[in-house]
């Protein structure tokens, strides 16, 4: 990363605590890193060490009614941990997102694949349902999913694990 180009993501000592009946439980206890645009970071560690909790904390995916955050997460000039919830909702899925380890568990079993992908498009882009549907077909095709015209109407359990992760 050259000194003229700002980092794509700067994570500065975040801490995430869950409120429980027995008091706060720390899920993330400070991890710092900086990523340049196009750079990839692999996070490794023992099961339960906080890898997923760290990523979910960066995106504020935990229910904020029982979660507190400290530290800073800078993305595109904004501290994600201090953004109001509605602004964070606009950033998440539109400018920054996460690919989960087990995509099938992230998909809602009662909605079709097409509807779930279209939902994100409709929330973040000013397009009609027809345009969103066309974009979903394009995305399924780009990811190499066979028979995208058929898959768009299928439910998560009808996809193989490989198809579900794209």
Image (cartoon, helix red, strand yellow):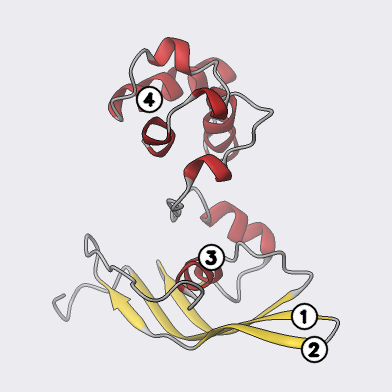
Image location (x, y in percent) of residue 80: 53, 71
Q: Earlier in the sequence, mark 3 or mark 4?
A: 3
Q: Residue at x 65, y 65 (%)?
A: 62
Q: Nearer the viewer, mark 4 or mark 1?
A: 1
Return the residue at label 3: 56
Residue 19: give its label.
1
Say whether residue 96 is left or right of residue 65. Answer: left
Q: Are marks 4 and 1 in contact (CB under 8 Å)?
A: no
Q: Residue furthest right?
A: 21
Between 41 and 78, the residue placed more toward the observer is 41
Q: Position of residue 82 (x, y in %)?
A: 60, 76
Q: Which residue is mark 2?
A: 23
Asked whether disc 3 touches disc 2, contact meaning CB atoms under 8 Å apart, the reply is no
120 over 139 or under it: above or below: below
Q: Is residue 164 above or below residue 148?
A: below
Q: Residue 99 location, x and y as percent? A: 42, 51
Q: Quadrant of residue 164?
A: top left
Q: Earlier in the sequence, mark 1 or mark 3?
A: 1
Neighbour tally class for label 4: few under 14, some 14-19, many 20 plus, Cα within 10 Å: many
Q: Secondary structure at mark 3?
A: helix
Which residue is at the far left?
Answer: 2
Q: Quadrant of the C terminus?
A: top left
Residue found at the far front of this picture: 47
Contact (Cβ within 8 Å) of mark 2 with mark 1:
yes
Q: What is the distance, in whole Å, between disc 1 and disc 3 at their CAs?
A: 16 Å
**Given contact means CB atoms under 8 Å apart, are the residues at marks 3 and 4 in contact?**
no
Determine the CA span between mark 4 and mark 1: 40 Å
Q: What residue is shown at x 72% (from left), y 69% (from top)?
A: 64
Front residue of 1 and 14: 14
């Amino acid at each position: 990363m050259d000194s003229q180009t700002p980092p794509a993501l700067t994570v500065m000592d975040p801490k995430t605590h869950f409120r429980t009946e027995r008091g706060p439980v720390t899920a993330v206890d400070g991890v710092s890193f900086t990523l340049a645009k196009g750079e990839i970071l692999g996070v490794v560690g023992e099961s339960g060490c906080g890898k997923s909790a760290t990523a979910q904390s960066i995106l504020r995916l935990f229910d904020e009614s029982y979660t507190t955050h400290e530290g800073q997460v800078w993305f595109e000039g904004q501290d994600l941990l201090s953004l109001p919830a509605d602004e964070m909702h606009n950033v998440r899925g539109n400018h920054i997102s996460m690919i989960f380890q087990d995509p099938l568990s992230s998909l809602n079993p009662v909605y079709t694949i097409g509807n779930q992908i279209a939902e994100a498009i409709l929330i973040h882009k000013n397009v009609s349902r027809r345009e969103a549907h066309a974009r979903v077909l394009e995305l399924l095709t780009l990811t190499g999913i066979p028979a995208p015209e058929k898959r768009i109407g299928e439910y998560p359990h009808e996809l193989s694990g490989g198809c579900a992760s794209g």
